[in-house]
Every structure is written in C-alpha cells, then in structure tokens.
Image: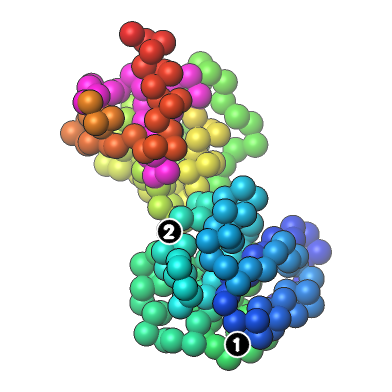
Amino acid sequence: MEENQNTTKLTCMIVDDEPLAIRLLENFINKTPYLTLSSSYDNSIEALHIEQLHPVNILFLDIQMPDLDGMELSRMVSEETRIIFTTAFKQYAFESYEVSALDFLLKPISYKKFLEATAKAVKWFERTASTGLDIKPDENSDFIFVKSNSQLVRVDIRTIAYVSGMKDYTRFFFNDGKRPLTALMTMKAVEELLPASRFMRVHRSYIVSLDKISSIDRNNCIYICNEVIHVSDAYRDIFSEYLKSKS
C-alpha cells in the first residue's frame, strides 16, 4: 500500500501468547507509516482491561490463548476497534467473520499480507469517518442525515423507535411502519448524532427513543414497538436515574 499523506495514523494493539509472533507484528507496525503501536500483551485478560480504558483502531488478535481466547475477547472489545485475527489455525476463518473481523491472517504472516489487511482497515476508517455530519443537531432538530447505500438519507427523528448495532453497521427501526434502515455507522457515532434528551443508550447494541417506551418490567426489560430490549448492567444506573426523574 502506498503511503497516503492525508491518512490519519491508526493505533494498534497486539494480543498474542507467542513472543515471536508479537515481535514480528511489532516490526511490521513500526515500519508501516500509517500505523502506530499502542501496546502489546501476551495476557488476553490484561489486554481487555487496557483496551476498554484506551480503545485502539486495530487489534491484532491471536485466537488460541489461555484464560480468554481471541473469539471471546473480540466480542468484548470497544465497538470502534477493528479486529484482525492472527492464527496458525485456518479452521477459525469462518468463525472470525461471524464476529465481524476485518481480516484473518494465517501464520506465518508475510508483510505483504499484513499490508493488505491493514489497507482494509484504512479504507474502513476513511469510509466511516464520512458517514456522519460535522454539525451535531440541536435538541429540537426534527431530522438527521445518515449514510446508507452510498447516499445520505434523511431520517425523521420523531419516527425513530430504537437503533440496534453490530460492528460495522447500525439499523434504525421506526414506529411508523417504515422498513428498517441500515447505515454504515458505529453506535457511538449514532449516539453522538441523536439528541441526548430524547434518546438513551441502554445496551452495547441498543439506543432507544425514550418517548417510544411503552413499559418496563422488573427485570429491566424495555418494551418498545413489539421489541423487548434488556438494559445491560453497564447502563442500568443512568437508566434508573432517568426513571426516577420521571416517577
């Protein structure tokens, strides 16, 4: 990949229990102009703790590791982090795409394959950087624009019931019978775009429209437009504070 003078450097973390594999990837990162190494770990649990505190752009992740394997860890990292699996076992290739991995590098890894994988990461971050608007709507905005199928689509905020997210995409669900809209945006980007007084994140994968909630049961399950959404532990306190303010 040719160096792009306008490309922002991507931060990287390596998690692998093989010291030789770590050193090889460190060497590849250090000689690649658009990458910068944040940290390397041979302990997946320690790495997860640090990554959650200080998310990176790319996580080079081995799969077979003690305590917490790479597949498990990949489901727990920050949603903005892109996974590139590095493993000696090709049978994991299919499973890696089920967790939305950006790429799958089979050991021994060549620098050519490494560059091809990181080029995908550059393209992904450049593409997602252009999905939102530079101007955040005010609390009284009636609409936002989101990027879907290579075009900006106007979305009426008043019709949004909830938003669900995956690694690469989010889906907007509406209360007016309109079909769900798939957008190339992270949940964090959607959360920043929607008015905070009218929408709340209640789960890693869900943002809800507060005025569309029909009921909440004692198990902290939200009933909204024929969907049941569980409030996860990470968001329970802030949601409880909201309920207290309305009770």
Secondary structure state at the residue bearing disc 2: loop
Q: What residue sits right under mark 1 in the picture?
A: 109
Residue 159 versus residue 187 in the image, above or below: above
- Residue drawn at x 79%, y 71% as measured from the top left: 33
Type of amino acid at the residue the image marks with label 2: Arg
CA gap, disc 2 to disc 1?
Answer: 24 Å
Residue 126 appears at what percent x and percent y?
A: 63, 57
Residue 107 appears at what percent x and percent y?
A: 55, 88
| Residue stretch in magenta | 195-217
Q: Residues within 10 Å of mark 2 (few under 14, many from 20)?
A: few
Residue 164's quadrant in the figure? top left
**Nearer to us in this view, 217 or 45:** 45
Residue 47 versus residue 138 in the image, above or below: below
Residue 65 appears at what percent x and percent y?
A: 48, 75
> Is-magenta flag for residue 208?
yes
Q: Is residue 94 visible?
A: yes
Residue 62 versus residue 225 in the image, above or below: below
**Nearer to us in this view, 143 or 24:** 24
Foreground: disc 2 or disc 1: 2
Q: Quadrant of the C terminus?
A: top left
Residue 64 appears at what percent x and percent y?
A: 46, 78
- Residue drawn at x 53%, y 61% as measured from the top left: 45
